[in-house]
Image: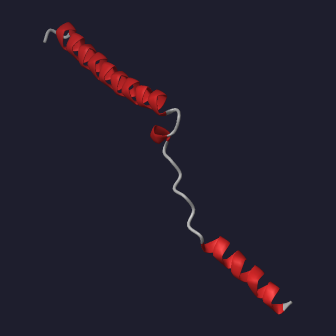
Amino acid sequence: MRFLLVLIILALAIWKLWPEPPVPTAEESFIGPQVQTLNKMEQFEEDYMKALDEKKERLEREADGG
């Protein structure tokens, strides 16, 4: 009976200390292509907003007599 108790405790200790498999990132999962497209669109949006700000500043300079 003592052997069974030691075996159970040993099995629980091994199970607790066993390393977990790494969690895959979103890019590595089945939705990877959609995430990559989303990242590209975010970069496109940043570039577009930057271009709008530059155009707005240029128009303000021209309006001031620049």
Q: Is residue 20 left or right of residue 16?
A: left
Query: Looking at the image, which is closer to me, 27 or 15?
Result: 15
To which quarter of the image does residue 62 belong? top left
Q: Is residue 6 left or right of residue 60?
A: right
Residue at 42 percent of width and 25 percent of height:
37
Please tell me whether residue 24 is drawn above or below residue 33 in the rendered image. Answer: below
Please tell me whether residue 37 is drawn above or below residue 64 in the rendered image. Answer: below
Residue at 71 percent of width and 77 percent of height:
11
To which quarter of the image does residue 65 belong? top left
Q: Is residue 11 left or right of residue 42?
A: right
Task: Check the picture and name the quadrant holding the N terminus.
Answer: bottom right
Residue at 48 percent of width and 27 percent of height:
34
Q: Looking at the picture, how far across and down is residue 54, in whole percent?
A: 24, 19
Query: Looking at the image, which is closer to me, 59 or 53?
Result: 53
Q: Looking at the picture, how far across and down is residue 14, in whole percent?
A: 64, 76
Query: Looking at the image, which is closer to me, 2 or 33?
Result: 2
Task: Check the picture and name the quadrant holding the C terminus.
Answer: top left
Q: Which residue in the rendered view is the most extreme toward the right?
A: 1
Residue at 57 percent of width and 62 percent of height:
20
Please tell me whether residue 26 is drawn above or below residue 1 in the rendered image. Answer: above
Q: Looking at the picture, how far across and down is residue 63, in whole percent?
A: 21, 7
